[in-house]
Image (spheres, helix red, strand yellow):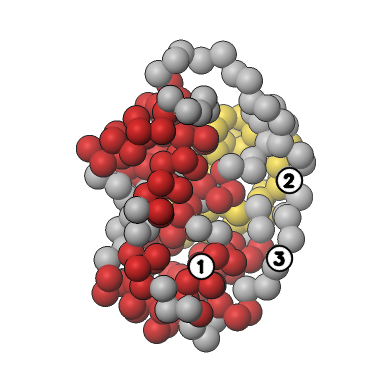
Amino acid sequence: MIGRLRGQVLAKHPPQVLIDVGGVGYEVEAPMSTFYDLPAVGEEVALVTHLVVREDAHVLYGFLHERDRALFRDLLKVTGVGAKMALAILSGMDAQRFAVCVEQEDITGLSRLPGIGRKTAQRLVMEMKDRVAGLGTGAVAGVLPARDIGASVAADAPLVDAVSALVALGYKPADAGRMARAVAEDVKTSEEIIRAALKSAGAG
């Protein structure tokens, strides 16, 4: 089991980040709550990880905070919740906000997350209520301060990347495109577009 990675960020294509560890490139899926705080390409980062083994692939998930990995692992134990849905949940809200929603039985708030219907939200509240109290505040796994990416890319590239990331998180392509375009004029990077789109969806 791979439990931690420390290395250089080679590429970022939300929700995936490529990390060079001793000359080996690890493709890591990260929730947007982690992705927002990743350092720029070329800088060093440390992530706590969880490896999901499927029949067709081995997928590595990475988190800056131990509390987020703990929540991810607890979510995988919930009936009907797989890794993709757990990633979407942690992209829409961090561990502390999720704990508040569960404790307050905020079914409506949880239902706004991609792929989470009312029945799934009710199941999350029922099965997670005894677990969220132990999430704690956690600590950063070893990330260095993030800096302005400032990359020179084509004007449409951030929007395309944002739409792809939203689709990967469970939104339908048409909905992802609409959400991203609605906020794209006010922000510049793909991470900012995704953050604004998810925030808008959560407020709806």
The x and y percentages for residue 200 are 41, 46
> Along the polypeptide, which appears first: circle 1 or circle 3?
1
Q: Mark 1 = which residue?
A: 98
Determine whether, in the image, residue 135 is placed left or right of residue 80: right
At label 2, the amino acid type is Val
Q: Are marks 3 and 2 in contact (CB under 8 Å)?
A: no
Q: What amino acid type is highlighted by mark number 3?
A: Gly
In this view, the residue in front, 128 or 66, is 128
Residue bearing mark 3: 138
Front residue of 135 and 99: 99
Pinpoint residue 43: horizontal percent, then vertical percent: 72, 32
The image quadrant of residue 184 is: top left
Residue shown at the point (27%, 66%) measured from the top left = 117
Give the number of the mark in front: 1 or 3.
1
The tag earlier along the polypeptide, 1 or 2, is 1
On the image, numbered disc 2 is attached to which residue? 143
Question: Disc 1 marks which amino acid?
Answer: Phe
> Based on the displayed image, in which of its 4 quarters is residue 70 positioned?
bottom right
Quadrant where the N terminus lies?
Answer: bottom right
Dot 1 falls on a residue whose secondary structure is: helix
